[in-house]
C-alpha cells in the first residue's frame, strides 16, 4: 500500500510540473509573438531609414556634382 501512495504522490507532482510547464510554454509563446511583432516593426523602420539614407546620399551626390561643375566653370572663366 505504501508503494501505491508513493506512486500517487509522484503522479500528483508530475501533473503539477506538467501544468507549470504548460503555463510557462504559454507565456513563452506570447513573448515570442510579441518579439516577432517588435522585430517586424524594427525591420520596417530599418528599411525606411535605409531608403531615406539612399535618398540623402543621392541628393548629396547631386549637390557635390553641381558644386564641382560650378567650381570648374568659375575656374574656366577666371582662366579666360
Image (spheres, rainbow, N blue to C red):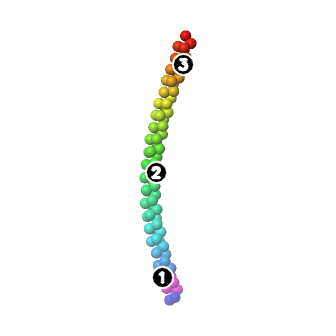
* Chief secondary structure of the magenta portion: helix
Number of marks in the image?
3
First reached walking from the N terminus: tag 2 or tag 3? 2
**Label 2 secondary element:** helix
Residue topped by disc 2: 39
Q: Which residues are magenta?
A: 3-9
Tell me residue 25's x, y (percent). 46, 65
Distance Cα–Cα, label 2 vs label 1 = 46 Å
First reached walking from the N terminus: tag 1 or tag 3? 1
State the residue in front, 17 or 3.
Answer: 17
Q: Label for residue 72?
A: 3
Residue topped by disc 1: 8
Distance Cα–Cα, label 1 vs label 3 = 93 Å
Report the residue at 52% width, 17% height from top.
Answer: 74
Q: Label for residue 58?
A: none
**Label 3 secondary element:** helix
Query: From this viewpoint, which residue is outermost toward the front?
Result: 78
Tell me residue 51's x, y (percent). 46, 38
Q: Compared to 72, does 27 lie above or below? A: below
| Label 1, residues with CA under 10 Å away: few <14, some 14-19, many ≥20 | few
Tell me residue 13's x, y (percent). 49, 77
Position of the C terminus, as image quadrant, is: top right
**Label 1 secondary element:** helix
Report the residue at 50% width, 29% height from top.
Answer: 61
Report the residue at 47% width, 34% height from top.
Answer: 56
Distance Cα–Cα, label 2 vs label 3 = 49 Å
Q: Compared to 73, does 61 lie above or below? A: below
Mark 2 or 3: the one toward you: 3
Residue 49 is one of the magenta-drawn residues:
no
Amino acid at each position: 500500500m505504501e508503494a501505491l501512495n508513493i506512486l500517487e504522490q509522484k503522479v500528483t507532482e508530475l501533473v503539477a510540473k506538467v501544468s507549470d510547464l504548460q503555463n510557462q510554454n504559454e507565456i513563452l509563446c506570447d513573448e515570442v509573438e510579441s518579439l516577432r511583432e517588435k522585430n517586424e516593426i524594427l525591420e520596417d523602420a530599418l528599411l525606411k531609414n535605409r531608403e531615406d539614407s539612399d535618398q540623402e546620399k543621392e541628393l548629396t551626390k547631386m549637390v557635390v556634382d553641381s558644386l564641382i561643375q560650378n567650381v570648374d566653370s568659375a575656374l574656366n572663366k577666371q582662366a579666360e
